[in-house]
Amino acid sequence: MRRLAAPLAIAAALAGPAAAQGTFPPQRLENLKVLPKDIPVRALIDTMAGFTRALGVRCTYCHVGKEGEPLASYDFKADEKPEKEKARVMLRMVAGINGDHLTKLATRREPAVGVACATCHRGVTVPRTLQQMLLSAYDAGGADSAESTYNALRERYYARAAYDFGEVALADVGAALRARGNLPDALRFYLLNTRMVPTSGFAFRMAADAQLAAGDTTAARASLERALEIAPNDPQAGRILDTLRKP
């Protein structure tokens, strides 16, 4: 039961006489401000459990209580934590998207597509993309910090929905740094991409482009040759390599 928290903890005031007697689940609910006031206790608990999984958190993220203590000791009714009010705002936003904005589409897929907490959060509390996480780390501590952040996130979240560790994220980071005029750091992340996704012709082609910009024709040619080994029909890589091979 302790994992049934309220990550997006919005409504949830599991409280009342039963809670005061040290029992969980309670017999009645209080302080529900977003979820239906007549929602069954079991349904509320299941909803809260879904929030914890969507955000990768536990009950204490939104609710007043001590981790490891029985849920009967938690003050679910309290609005003390700002995360709980944020969760209420987020729930209203989700309801508005599903019930207002999406319903105005002239045509919709069947069954209708809707959003949920996990749509954006993907199992993390702050719904930022991998690119945003790495660029924030770069701004805070440079290339070493960004690469360390990438390795830590990959170790923790690889094969989960939280972040996309495919060929695109590091290429985007490289492009962003190149646009800032930081070509050496950009090249570092393009090359990291070729090591992390060694079966991606795209990764090698992007690395080659940066290597050419840095004036390293030999390295660029090697990267393009590798790109074409992986994707023989890549027209962009083929054209660039043909140009480099001309006397």
Image (spheres, rainbow, N blue to C red):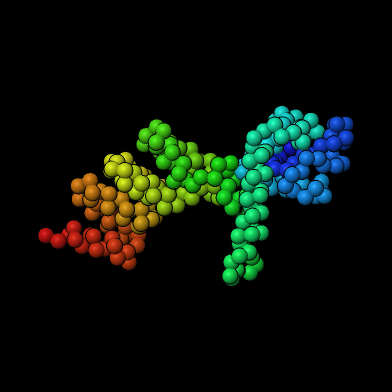
Q: Residue at image x 76%, y 36%? A: 76
Where residue 180 sits in the image (x, y, percent)?
31, 43
Q: Residue at image x 45%, y 44%? A: 132
Can residue 61 be seen from the camera position used here? no
Q: Quadrant of residue 62?
A: top right
Can residue 140 be seen from the camera position used here? yes
Q: Is residue 177 above or below residue 243?
A: above
Where residue 32 sits in the image (x, y, percent)?
77, 43
Quadrant containing the C terminus in the rendered view: bottom left
Q: Residue at image x 74%, y 37%? A: 2
Left or right: 97, with 47 as reference point: left
Which residue is at the front of the view, 174 or 12? 12
Quadrant containing the N terminus in the rendered view: top right
Which residue is at the front of the view, 33 or 194? 33
Where residue 8 sits in the image (x, y, percent)?
66, 43
Number of marks in the rendered image: 0
Where residue 230 sits in the image (x, y, percent)?
35, 59
Q: Residue at image x 43%, y 38%? A: 136
Which residue is at the front of the view, 155 or 59? 59
Residue at the extreme bottom of the image, as rendered: 107
Residue at the extreme left of the image, as rendered: 247
Left or right: 188, with 79 as reference point: left
